[in-house]
Amino acid sequence: MTNQLPTLDVCFSPELLPLYDLRGKVAVVVDVLRATSSIVTALAQGVTHLIPFSELEACRAQATAGYLTAAERDGRQAEGVDLGNSPFGYLDGVVPVRDRAVAITTTNGTRALHLSAAADEIVVGAFLNLGAVADHLRQLQKDVVVVCAGWKGKFCLEDTLFGGALAARLQADFDTTGSDATLAALDLWRAAEPDLTGYLLKSSHVRRLNSLEAHKDMEFCIRQDEYQLVPIFDGSRIT
Ligand code: 3SL
């Protein structure tokens, strides 16, 4: 009798999610640049929990309930909120974040979290917590779908690279051969890994961030295993 391994699949864009059945599976939602990297950083800096919103107004309204508000649209901090979407917003001490709760909305990342609601568990993934997420998935032994947040429905390199990096870490414990998307993500990761910074410089989102002078965010967001935490979105809060 053969022991069947759980599968690891990669969904390149939230627009493709209707083609995936997330029931009974773990969704690892990733928006390397920058939503999930910022969420991981926020929790590592002592934020108690985050509530992700799809709509800007709903997020802003949480200020009256004592939440810090974090909002990004088209790469820029939205008007009338405490924080943008840079992980350094949680690190630089300008806005004290320890023991605060954060209401957050971003163009793609928070939307991808809500669109993954059918999964048994929704994990927030980033390069910053890659190893911790891999360990967690090894323990769960359930089928996994990496949900790439992409950019406005389109494929993006950095989230796909995370899918490849996660698949590479889990190759001994998961079936990473059954889906062309996972095979492509693995190949992309192997091609890019020797010079990840150089590779990502050509990506559309890094060019977009460059134009907003946020290049240091990219350097930070591609650091691997900076934090040992596995944020879970329970449909309401990320803790
Ligand atoms: O789209 C998103 O969710 C954001 O992460 C985009 S940005 O990196 O803040 O521009």
Image: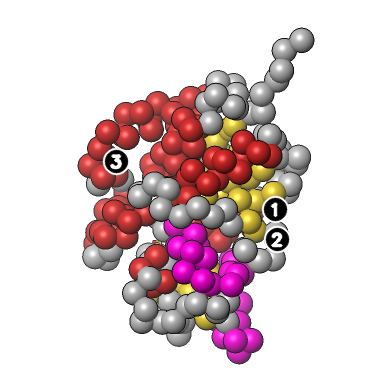
Most foreground residue, 20 or 44: 44
Residue 117's label in the rendered image is: 1
**Of the residues under marks 2 and 3, which one precedes in the sequence?**
3
Quarter location, residue 25: top right
The answer to the question of whether label 3 and label 1 lie on touching residues, with beta carbons closer than 8 A, is no
**Could you tell me how many numbered marks the image carries?**
3
Q: For the point 37% across and 54% down, which residue is it? A: 221
Prevalent SS, magenta region: helix
Measured as percent of width and height from the top left, residue 28 is found at 58, 46
Q: Which residues are magenta?
A: 37-66
Q: Amino acid at mark 3?
A: Leu
What secondary structure is marked by label 2? loop
Q: Residue furthest top?
A: 1
**Looking at the image, can residue 20 be seen?**
no
Confirm whether residue 92 shows in the render: yes
Towards the viewer: 45 or 185: 45
Q: Residues within 10 Å of mark 1 (few under 14, many from 20)?
A: some
- Image location (x, y in percent) of residue 57: 57, 78
Residues at marks 1 and 2 touching, judged by CB atoms closer than 8 Å:
yes
Q: Quadrant of ligand 1?
A: bottom left
Quadrant in the picture for the C terminus = bottom right
Q: Identify residue for label 3.
A: 196
In the image, taking residue 133 as reference, residue 65 lies left or right, namely: right
The image shows residue 33, relative to residue 18, as above or below, that is: below
Tell me: residue 97, above or below residue 30.
below
Q: Earlier in the sequence, mark 1 or mark 2?
A: 1
The amino acid type, in three-letter code, at marker 1 is Ala
Residue position for label 2: 235
